[in-house]
C-alpha cells in the first residue's frame, strides 16, 4: 500500500502579505516601532545638540553639526518610509498609518531645519560677468547711446 504525500501549503498562505495582520498584533507593532523611532530620533538629535553646545561658539563646528543633523534626519526619513512600505506589504494598516504620520513629522522637521539653515546662510552675491558694464551714472538706467547699439 502506498502512503499519500502530505499536502503542501499553497504559496499564497506562506507569504506574509497573503493574510491581513490581526488588529492586536498590528497595534502592538505600531506602538513598539513608534516608541523605538521616537527614542532613536531623540537620541540622535540630542547627540547633535550636544555637539553644537560643545562647539562653544565656533561657527564652523556648529554649521558642521547642523548639516550632519539635517543629513541624518533625511536618512531617517527614508528608513521610516521603508518601514511604512514593509508595513503596507504586510497588510498592517495601523502600523502603516503610524509610520506615514511619523514620516510626515520628520519631513516637516527636515524642511524646517533646511529653511532655518538656508536663512542663516544666504548665498553669496553673484559676481559680475566679463561682458557686463555697470552703469556709473547713478540713475540705474542704461544711457541712450548704449540702447541704440
Image (tube, grey):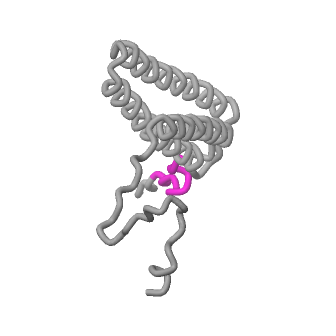
**On screen, residue 35 above or below 30:** above
**Magenta-drawn stretch contains 8:** yes
Q: Residue furthest bottom?
A: 149
Q: Relative to the observer, which residue lies in front, 65 or 58?
A: 58
Relative side of 143 to 20, left or right: left
The image quadrant that residue 55 belongs to is top left
Q: Residue furthest left?
A: 130
Q: Relative to the observer, which residue lies in front, 43 or 20?
A: 43
**Magenta-drawn stretch contains 88:** no
Q: Relative to the observer, which residue lies in front, 41 or 99?
A: 41
Q: Residue at x 50, y 54 (%)?
A: 7
Main SS class of the magenta portion in the image: loop
Q: Quadrant of the C terminus?
A: bottom left
Q: Residue furthest right?
A: 23
Task: Indicate the position of residue 10 as horizontal and vertical percent values.
Answer: 52, 56
Q: Quadrant of the N terminus?
A: bottom left
**On screen, residue 108 above or below 141:** above
Task: Indicate the position of residue 17 as horizontal and vertical percent values.
Answer: 56, 50
Q: Give, as a single range, the part of the protein colored magenta.
A: 6-16
Relative side of 69 to 89, left or right: left
**On screen, residue 74 above or below 148:** above
Q: Residue at x 51, y 50 (%)?
A: 15
Q: Residue at x 39, y 47 (%)?
A: 124
Q: Residue at x 51, y 52 (%)?
A: 9
Task: Indicate the position of residue 65 as horizontal and vertical percent values.
Answer: 36, 27
Q: Relative to the observer, which residue lies in front, 71 or 120?
A: 120
Task: Indicate the position of residue 82 as horizontal and vertical percent values.
Answer: 49, 45
Count of all numbered marks drawn on residues in the image: 0
Amino acid at each position: 500500500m502506498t502512503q499519500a504525500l502530505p499536502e503542501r501549503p499553497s504559496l499564497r498562505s506562506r507569504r506574509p502579505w497573503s493574510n491581513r495582520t490581526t488588529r492586536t498584533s498590528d497595534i502592538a507593532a505600531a506602538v513598539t516601532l513608534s516608541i523605538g523611532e521616537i527614542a532613536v530620533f531623540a537620541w540622535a538629535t540630542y547627540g547633535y545638540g550636544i555637539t553644537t553646545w560643545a562647539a562653544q561658539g565656533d561657527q564652523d563646528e556648529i554649521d558642521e553639526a547642523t548639516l550632519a543633523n539635517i543629513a541624518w534626519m533625511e536618512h531617517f526619513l527614508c528608513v521610516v518610509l521603508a518601514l511604512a512600505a514593509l508595513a503596507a506589504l504586510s497588510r498592517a494598516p495601523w502600523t502603516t498609518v503610524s509610520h506615514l504620520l511619523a514620516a510626515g513629522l520628520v519631513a516637516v522637521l527636515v524642511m524646517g531645519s533646511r529653511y532655518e539653515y538656508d536663512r542663516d546662510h544666504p548665498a553669496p552675491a553673484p559676481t559680475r560677468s566679463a561682458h557686463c558694464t555697470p552703469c556709473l551714472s547713478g540713475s540705474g538706467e542704461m544711457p541712450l547711446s548704449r540702447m541704440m547699439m
